[in-house]
Image (cartoon, rainbow, N blue to C red):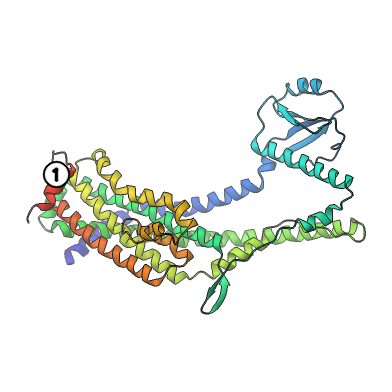
Amino acid sequence: MNKILLIIQREYLSRVRKKSFLVLTFLVPVLFVGMIALIGYLAVHQDAMSDKKIVKVVDESGWFANKLKNSTSIEFDYTTASFASTKEEVLKSDDEYVLYIPATLTNIQLLGKKKPSAYTSQTIEERVNSVAQSHRLAEAHIDSSVLAGVQQSLHVEVKQITEKGEKDAHSVVTLLLGMLCAVVIYMSLFIYGVQVMRGVIEEKVSRIIEVIISSVKPFQLMMGKIIGVGAVGLTQFLLWIVLSVGLFYAGGSTLMKTGVKSKTEQMKKMQQQANEMPAGQAAAPPAGDENEMGEIMRSLAEVNVPYIVGCFLFYFLFGYMLYSAIFAAVGSAVDSETETQQFVLPVTLPLVFTFMLAQSVIINNPDSSLSVWLSMIPFTSPIAMMIRLQFGVPMWQLGLSMLLLLGGFLVTVWVAGRIYRVGILMYGKKASYKELAKWFTYKD
């Protein structure tokens, strides 16, 4: 046991002290938070950053004169010129289009020298439909405000009945949380499992392994490498979580101040619109995300953090050690990383298969027979069970899944250890599945 601890210490410290580990540990949270902030900024300010498009409107129907609303990226220019002459004029510029609206309102066309973006064409179509709808309502003597009230969508609250009473189910939040856990486990099994395999190959090729084996048993060396690299991965993930939460918290206060300021300006604008409107009419409240954001924050506060974190750590650790044992056996069977492809692909297929199914079958039907079986099989349970957990899993299924994963880990380590003990001392011989079977049957 002391020898295994020494190997764990060596593997852990040799990787933690590397500059690459320190750089990635502090850089990834910054890049992650920065990426989310950049995506949010670009989504909000996409109109302001895009070149303004001039849309010349040839309206033969007379419905749309000065009624199409401009945006920061689209400006409507109404013309009395003919459709043919306007087309010739538009061909001289890359940022000009002609919107042709015939009197029959059929075959409305948007033409330009360059293809319009999906956002531009969709925005113009929405503006046209909005004006056409208002015009038809006015012709039918229908009050648009009454129609808007009739068409108001209804919200269905999703709740779960428990022994303590009803509680919000928060389907979207649980879905995102489950997918996040699955993605983290999926990536970690590949990243740190491959690190174990590369470490074995490097020591084997450099012949350092021969010196190490003279002092420790092959199984002790394999377990030491697996646990040591796993501890490095766990340390890095914990640091990423702490740093990311800290950055989100620091940025959240700034966003909150900005949101309060924006909300104040919005309320002033609403009051001004209400004062300008005729008596008996009320200004419609502007669309906002405050309620949705508040609902998300409340749902996150209701998450059973100890339960989710405990299950995550179990499936992360034992899933990693199961696959790392296989990667270690693969690394001991080859002399270079290029020879690992024939063994790595079959090993990783269950993970890829489960991850692909997670985005459709498991999410849409977490209690189906296929979802339950995937959450029980040791090679697929780390991903499948973390998604199913968010929708509620019977305790007997969770316990059986953990027991099978633990048993699968022990069997896999035993099988991989028997291959590893022979493979690390084999040089110059290309391994095959038949050869691995022979190594497994060799007596000590």
Residue drawn at (15%, 44%) of the image:
434
Q: Nearer the viewer, residue 94 or 207?
A: 94
In the image: residue 254, left or right of residue 77: left
Residue drawn at (46%, 62%) of the image:
242
Find residue 283 and report its image quarter: bottom right
Q: Where is residue 294 in the image (x, y as percent from the top left)?
A: 63, 65
Q: Residue furthest bottom?
A: 164
Q: Position of residue 430 (x, y in %)?
A: 16, 38
Residue 107, compared with residue 323, is above or below; it is above
In the image: residue 261, left or right of residue 180: right
Q: Mark 1 points at which residue?
A: 435
Residue 403, compared with residue 377, is above or below; it is below
Find residue 263 and report its image quarter: bottom right
Residue drawn at (29%, 54%) of the image:
323
Q: Which of 4 and 327 is in front in this view?
A: 327
Can you see residue 281? yes
Can you see residue 71? no
How many C-alpha atoms fall within 10 Å of the one at disc 1: few (<14), some, or many (≥20)?
some
Residue drawn at (38%, 49%) of the image:
353
Quadrant of the frame with the N terminus: bottom left
Residue 399, compared with residue 244, is above or below; it is below
In the image: residue 44, left or right of residue 336: right
Identify the element where label 1 is drawn: helix
Task: Tell me how many marks there are.
Answer: 1
Q: Position of residue 228 (x, y in %)?
A: 27, 59
Q: Residue furthest right?
A: 279
Q: Where is residue 301 in the image (x, y as percent from the top left)?
A: 55, 69
Residue 7, compared with residue 37, is above or below; it is below
Residue type highlighted by circle 1: Glu
